[in-house]
Amino acid sequence: MSTTMLAGRLHLDTRTFAVEEVPVPVPGPGEVLIEVRAAGVCLSDVHLIDGSLTPAFPVEAVTRSGAVTLGHEVAGVIHALGPGLLGDWAPGMRVALQAGQACGACTDCMRRSPCPRPLTRGVDYDGGWAEYAVAREDTLAPIPDHLPFDEAAIIPDAVSTPYAAIIETGAVRPAQSVGVWGAGGLGAHGIRLARLAGAAPVIAVDPLPEARERALAFGADLALDPADPGFAAAVGRATGGRGLDAAFDFAGFPAVREQAAALLGAGGVLVLAGLTPEPLTITDSTSFSYRGNQIRGQYGSGPEHVTQLIRLAAAGRLDLASSITDHIPLAEAADAVTRLEKKTGNPIRLVLTP
């Protein structure tokens, strides 16, 4: 085995990204070395490169080197074991990696479970846009032999974030009306998962015609253009005049949130899963209060959501094959970032293959 490998590295001081040759990492106590087979490209990776996102809790190695290997959606096989492992792990085992891990030392970790502000793989510490990646054993999620690596890789975040938003934060129940703003990497899965939860109707909202077509293919009952003059009336007709029980912002735009809030029915909730630093505005706050509406934030997901989704995908309840838009060699990671940023080919998920 070579002592060096290719890795997609973001230099944080200059915000320059390049695939570089770096030393293969060595697993420490409680860690394993993963041979990466697939790694998803997420819009968060684009935002890290353009500077609109930045590591919140960078580990010492990232701070010292000033660079981080991107990639928080990762699957592969265990290649080597570090010392002091508690689990029954072995080389060759197929695993997906949780998108983050608790630091295990701060006050929040001591007081709460799950951790309310975990370190994020590929942001606060090195991720999986590489030939090999180190992972703590408590972040490993075994995957069955018949679940492809590319589908398993995108479960953490691309699928688990909308799953947690819908099942936990939005608490969607059968026959409730749901609106999904943004039919991209998160929203497309949000549509499929809302339907799996029994929501009816599921209304997708996206300004792009091709995204609306995809939303219908993924199970939306209705796909609307938010700029259409008859938009609000169409939502009213679809919900029988009751409004939405839950609205999900997977786009991260202030205008989306204001539009979604105005369409909530009595007791309806607005869940913010798309990220933006812009302020939130509720124009008619009196009506918002009168209806008993709520706003809830969603960031990432918990380890249990990833393991549940692996079971659902493995059992054939959740088709993820259609979510993989293309496979791109790791050496061409910069091209993948550009394709996602410019929405070339209307991608759901691009997957890097070392």
Image (tube, helix red, strand yellow):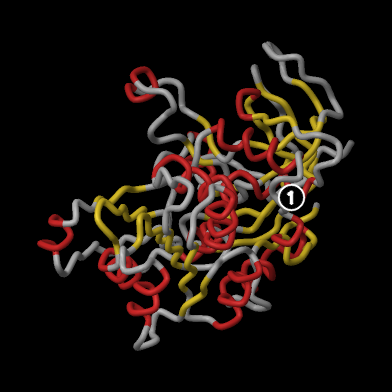
> Number of numbered discs present?
1
Residue at far right of view = 1
Q: Residue furthest bottom?
A: 229
Dividing the picture into quadrants, the one containing residue 152 is: top right
Task: Give the residue drawn at x 34%, y 48%.
Answer: 297
> Observer-nearest residue: 100 or 79?
100
Q: Residue at x 45, y 81 (%)?
A: 225
Give residue 39's position: percent from left, percent from top: 70, 51
Q: Residue furthest left?
A: 286
Q: Residue at x 64, y 75 (%)?
A: 346
- Residue 130 or 95: which is nearer the viewer? 95
Q: Is residue 324 left or right of residue 168?
A: right
> Secondary structure under badge 1?
helix
Q: Foreground residue, 319 or 230?
A: 230
Is disc 1 surrounded by few (<14), some (14 to 19) or many (20+) residues within 10 Å? many
Quarter of the N terminus within the rendering: top right
Where is mark 1, residue-wise? Answer: 151
Q: Position of residue 9 (x, y in %)?
A: 62, 53
Instruction: Check the image and report above or below for 109 versus 302.
Output: above
Q: Is residue 162 left or right of residue 133?
A: left
Percent across and percent down for residue 128 are: 67, 45
Tell whether 261 sits left or right of 103. left
